[in-house]
């Protein structure tokens, strides 16, 4: 009885640790995106102030056209850089989540095979159920092995 209680306590502790890890991954990704947004907002405010100063000094239409040409290219480059940074942050978070899921699948597979082994060991050797369970265990183990070989992106 104590063994069962200890198993439940261990299971609860493991689930808590997994939940905390998942929460930390999600919060880390959100924090990266928030910091990126704050940096963008800061840069935009600075740049808008510079643009407003430059516009106040424009005296002719030709100067306005030249000013617009000069502002367009840096804005496109900054937009591309921001998109790249957002993509990297999202990819990093996704990779961490994929790793967590892959670890969970491998642990589940290991526990399932272990449970099947225990069930086979506890049944009488002469029973037809043992033969069927052994065959089933081999099929499950083969399927789980094939699944664990798949790349994380296939999950």
Image (cartoon, rainbow, N blue to C red):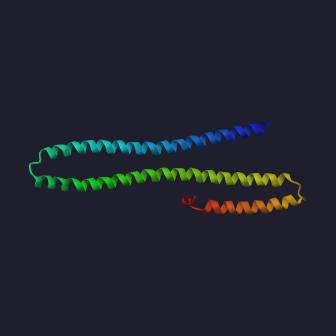
On screen, 27 above or below 83? Answer: above
Q: Residue furthest left?
A: 59
Q: How many marks?
A: 0
Left or right of 19: which side holds 127?
right
Q: Residue furthest front?
A: 61
Q: Residue at x 37, y 45 (%)?
A: 36
Q: Position of residue 153 (x, y in %)?
A: 54, 59
Q: Residue at x 69, y 53 (%)?
A: 110
Q: Residue furthest right?
A: 126
Q: Position of residue 149 (x, y in %)?
A: 61, 62
Q: Residue at x 16, y 43 (%)?
A: 53
Query: Where the N terminus falls, by quadrant?
Result: top right
Q: Position of residue 70 (x, y in %)?
A: 19, 55
Q: Residue at x 88, y 60 (%)?
A: 128
On screen, 19 above or below 89? Answer: above
Q: Quadrant of residue 39?
A: top left
Query: Where the C terminus falls, by quadrant?
Result: bottom right
Q: Nearer the viewer, residue 133 or 75?
A: 75
Left or right of 6: which side holds 72?
left
Q: Position of residue 67 (x, y in %)?
A: 16, 52
Left or right of 118: which side holds 43?
left
């Amino acid at each position: 009885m104590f063994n069962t209680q200890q198993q439940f306590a261990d299971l609860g502790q493991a689930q808590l640790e997994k939940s905390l890890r998942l929460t930390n991954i999600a919060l880390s990704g959100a924090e990266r995106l928030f910091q990126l947004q704050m940096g963008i907002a800061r840069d935009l405010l600075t740049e808008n102030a510079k643009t407003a100063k430059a516009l106040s000094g424009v005296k002719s239409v030709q100067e306005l056209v030249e000013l617009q040409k000069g502002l367009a290219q840096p804005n496109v480059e900054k937009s591309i850089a921001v998109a790249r940074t957002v993509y990297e942050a999202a990819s990093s978070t996704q990779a961490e989540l994929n790793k967590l899921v892959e670890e969970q699948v491998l642990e589940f597979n290991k526990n399932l095979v272990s449970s099947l082994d225990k069930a086979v060991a506890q049944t009488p050797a002469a029973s037809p159920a043992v033969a069927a369970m052994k065959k089933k265990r081999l099929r499950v183990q083969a399927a789980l092995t094939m699944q664990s070989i798949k790349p994380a992106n296939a999950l």
